[in-house]
Amino acid sequence: MSGEGMIIIVVAFLILGVVIAANSAHTNELIREGKAIKRETEFYKNEEFFTAAIPANTAIEKVSQVNVNGIKASAGRLRSGHIGVGFGFKGYWTATFAYLGAKDEKALYRFAFTGWKTRNGGVYGYSEMNMLITAVEKALLAIDPDAVVETHRMKVKSKMSIV
């Protein structure tokens, strides 16, 4: 490999290191501010099930009022047929919060990211995803501090785009 080729590789790694450090610093700042929590790297591939003593209309109203910059929320009937809240972030990703019915005299809800765009292994709007799920969790726990959350990994299908 020529000296110029080696310089290009070193510069590329330096730039990558700076980008990773900047993203990490941004995430740490959000965590300190209480807007996000530390999560596993691919948390967006999980679905969260909430069991809580919260009536569906109350939970849906509260979750639809969650305010994270740039995220659009819309309450109503979802594509799944359940009532809930759909979220979207600048065309980069979507998520849903749905009322699934009653379980042991409590309501069962599901939160999941339903689609996202990636580039070079990174997810667009990653910090906003964390901020949204954190805000939803806080909203539900504010109403029912005894709410229980179960996290399960989803089966994810991906599409490769050549464009």
Image: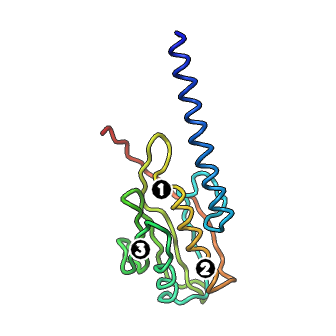
Residue at mark 1: 125
Q: Residue at x 66, y 62 (%)?
A: 31
Q: Amino acid at mark 2?
A: Thr
Element marked by disc 2: strand
Number of residues whose C-alpha sits closer than 10 Å to that of mark 2, classed few (under 14), some (14–19) or many (20 or more): many
Q: Nearer the viewer, mark 1 or mark 2?
A: 1
Which quarter of the figure has residue 36?
Answer: bottom right
Give above or below for 156 relative to 64: above
Residue at mark 2: 51
Q: Residue at x 48, y 50 (%)?
A: 123
Residue at mark 3: 73
Element marked by disc 3: strand
Number of residues whose C-alpha sits closer than 10 Å to that of mark 1, classed few (under 14), some (14–19) or many (20 or more): some
Q: Residue furthest top?
A: 2
Q: In terms of depth relative to the viewer, which is nearer, 36 or 154?
A: 36
Where in the figure is residue 73, as x and y percent of width and height? 41, 74
Q: Amino acid at mark 1?
A: Gly
Q: In terms of depth relative to the viewer, which is nearer, 115 or 89?
A: 89
Q: CA distance from mark 2 to mark 3?
A: 22 Å
Q: In terms of depth relative to the viewer, which is nearer, 128 or 10?
A: 10
Q: CA distance from mark 1 to mark 2?
A: 28 Å
Q: Residue at x 36, y 59 (%)?
A: 91
Q: Amino acid at mark 3?
A: Ala
Which quarter of the figure has residue 133?
Answer: bottom right
Residue 116 tag number: none
